[in-house]
Amino acid sequence: VAVTAPMARLHLPSLPTLLCCSAASLLLLLRWQWRRRLWKKVKEVQLKHERGVAQMEKIWLGFRKKVGAIISTVGGCKGGEAPTPPRLIAVRAGCISPVGFTGSPQALQITRETNCITEYMWESETKFQQAVRPEKPGLLFGVPVSIKDSINCQGYDSTIGFASNINKPAAEDSVLVQVLKRQGAIPFVKTNVPQSLISYDCNNVIFGQTLNPTLYTRTSGGSSGGEGALIGGGGSILGFGTDLGGSLRLPAAFCGICALKPTGNRLSKTGHGMVAAVGPMAKKVETLALAMRALLCEDMFNLDSTVPPLPFNEEVYSSTKPLRIGYYETDFFTMPSPSMRRAVREMKQLLEDAGHTVGHGNNPLHRDQEWRLQIHESCHKFIAQWKKLNLDVMLCPVLGPALPVGYPGKLAVATSYTILYNCLDFPAGVVPVTTVTDEDEDEMENYKGHYGDHWDRILAKGFSGSVGLPVAVQCVALPWQEELCLRFMREVEKLAEEKNRIV
């Protein structure tokens, strides 16, 4: 049978086509293998984390049985509170293990509820005992401290939420951790962060989402969100994080604790995930002051020569001289929630009643829409206006209450209240002063934002349903005046506590 020409001719792929298809298949295979290896590493870390929780519980139960009688003799301290002197005496005498002293039951409970801890540092007790002589205790002797994931601790990963950073432990401690240890502190856990740190939520592919200890449907904030949740829930006395656009202050405000973002170079940045200001977080302003007092020492200045040798100014912090305070209720970019505005107004009145001078003022840059391309010039303008008004400090809002999980990713623009003072490089701290009331919630019906746009509508939805959540104010001073900022924060804290006791 004759075969026609078209049937006889076979259309085979050309050699270049075959090579391209083979290369594409190979790339897909390699990508699949790479992702499989990464997810295997993630699973290993997650299992390690679960074993750490179980081991922590086992150690605490054994510790409680062993020294329960001693604790009842010398007295205890509630989770999240500064340790009492008798308990420190017991640690110094060797009667109580420093690691057992960390409030493990509360830390365990909080991380089960909020997923805030990423790693447990079990060798810290041995290192502590070898490094510190009881006859010369440092200012933080016996104080357990929690450390943000991105701050290097020797032998531990600083993943910043990336699977590719797993099993790459830091070769040495950051300068901050070195000084903490020399002052007798005990780093006992590392805490969760958002992937890349560029978020004020707290979620990553390795450890997952960290929740707010007050309301689990809300975010703890970020990027120091693990610290905010752990300290806010009473699982740590003192913690350290970093702040690039509000990463200390937003978690503190969301979780109802205090935090200080110092001037950028007041504390060493060496050994951190990003070039951001590093600062302390705690439930009380006095604990922040203790931390700064301990860190601003010769060890800090010698280990990092880029840090100016400015010891803590006790005279400024301890002063009772009335302050000249400026304030504003809005930055005219992000409209404050009713509770944010009320918090500033009420604190302004309390400060005036206490004998301070509070002058109404606007953010000097609020009409300058181009200030974010003109940072250097705007900083001089801001300082000039500040000095013209003869101000000591500034009172202003901080974003709050805590937003629902996932909302920060839609609302990066809402960081305007905090990021301003990163751009200007002013020290700024937050102090919780009130909680959202039913009246605040009712006022949300009229919240439209400054622009009435897509972001304002999302923000209004995020603010709603927040009765009972903490609300803070922001306290600001001029560059290098951390002690004055802390002194102002302490005054705000005292007045808020007095008012809340009366209520």
Image (cartoon, rainbow, N blue to C red):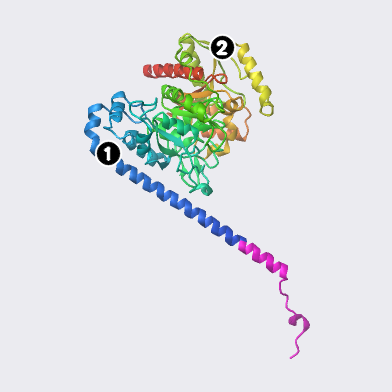
Question: Residues under labels 2 and 1: Cα distance?
Answer: 55 Å
Q: Position of residue 212 (x, y in %)?
A: 44, 36
Residue 152 forms part of the magenta stretch:
no
Query: Horizontal and vertical percent for residue 248?
Result: 50, 30
Q: Which mark is residue 63?
A: 1
Residue at position x 51%, y 57% in the image: 36
What stretch of residues is rendered in magenta?
Answer: 1-26
Front residue of 136 and 323 = 136
Classify 10 Å Cα crowding around label 2: few (below 14), some (14-19), many (20 and above). Answer: some
449 left or right, relative to 471: right
Judging from the image, what secondary structure is the residue with disc 2 in? strand
Front in this rendered view, residue 402 or 45:
45
Earlier in the chain: of badge 2 and badge 1, it is 1
Residue 93 visible in image: yes
Look at the image and tell me in which quarter the C terminus lies.
top left
Three-letter residue code for mark 2: Gly
The tag on residue 359 is 2
Q: Secondary structure at mark 1?
A: helix
Reply above or below: 303 against 386.
Answer: below
> Quick check: can you spot residue 366?
no
Mark 1 residue type:
Phe
- Please indicate whether residue 55 sits to the left or right of residue 271 in the image: left
Q: Is residue 319 left or right of residue 375?
A: left
Q: Check the image and report above or below for 73 versus 99.
A: above
